[in-house]
Image (tube, helix red, strand yellow):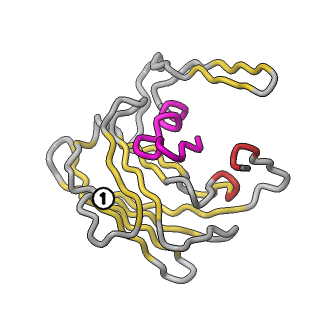
Amino acid sequence: MFDGGGNEWHVGHRRWVLNPAMKRTAFGWCESFSAMKCFDASRTPEANFLFVAWPSPGSFPLELCPKEIPWSVTLNPGYYSYTGQETVTLERLSDGSRWQFSTGGIPYDGFFTVNTQWYGVPYCIIFRPERALTYLAGDTFRVTLSGLRKKDGTADSLTWKTSFFNLPGFQHYYYRR
């Protein structure tokens, strides 16, 4: 789920793990190596979803969202069509700090891309604030996606809140250098 570095352009690992069409998976482990089989789309009936966000709406463990990795929102291409006009506004509610992201990059507050490659679901908005930002337990962020277009051609937007909390005892070994 980390998908940092060069993977931030598509967050493909994350999108496969969170693929709503996946019904079956498998895990393997040997010494210090692990693997997950996630190339499955056998769920029937099809999952009915508007979007899959990471971090997700509602409460989210702070330890799973270090500031170096991007946020992502996968939109259901059965409901939404890619427009090239997608924008994201991220607001920290405690102090009103805002970050805005768009394809045109004006204003430019960090990394932003829309990826339509087939990594589970082929419509994903990816963003990460570049300004100094530290996430704290108790922080609540409002995420607003605009510039969306429903399949019937009407304009749409989505808004939700994500609140970070501490996950006591959690060891995130994959972030250590």
Please determine whether, in this image, residue 137 is positioned above or below residue 76.
Answer: below
Q: Which residue is at the far bottom? A: 95
Magenta stretch mostly in which secondary structure?
Answer: helix
Amino acid type, mark 1: Ser
Circle 1 Cα neighbour tier, 10 Å, few/some/many (<14 / 14–19 / ≥20): some
Q: Position of residue 115 (x, y in %)?
A: 33, 42
Question: Please, what secondary structure does the residue beneath circle 1 have?
Answer: strand
Please determine whether, in this image, residue 100 is positioned above or below residue 22.
Answer: below
Is residue 67 shown in magenta?
Answer: no
Q: Residue at x 57, y 80 (%)?
A: 94
Q: Position of residue 173 (x, y in %)?
A: 76, 44
Q: Position of residue 47 (x, y in %)?
A: 44, 30
Left or right of residue 67: residue 154:
left
**Quadrant housing the N terminus:** top right
Q: Which residues are magenta?
A: 1-18
Q: Residue at x 48, y 81 (%)?
A: 96
Residue named by callout 1:
157
Left or right of residue 23: residue 152:
left
Left or right of residue 21: residue 112:
left
Q: Residue at x 23, y 62 (%)?
A: 104
Is residue 2 shown in magenta?
Answer: yes
Q: Which residue is at the far left? A: 153
Please determine whether, in this image, residue 176 is positioned above or below residue 79.
Answer: below
- Dividing the picture into quarters, in which one does residue 163 lie? bottom right
Left or right of residue 85: residue 27:
right
Q: Residue at x 75, y 47 (%)?
A: 172
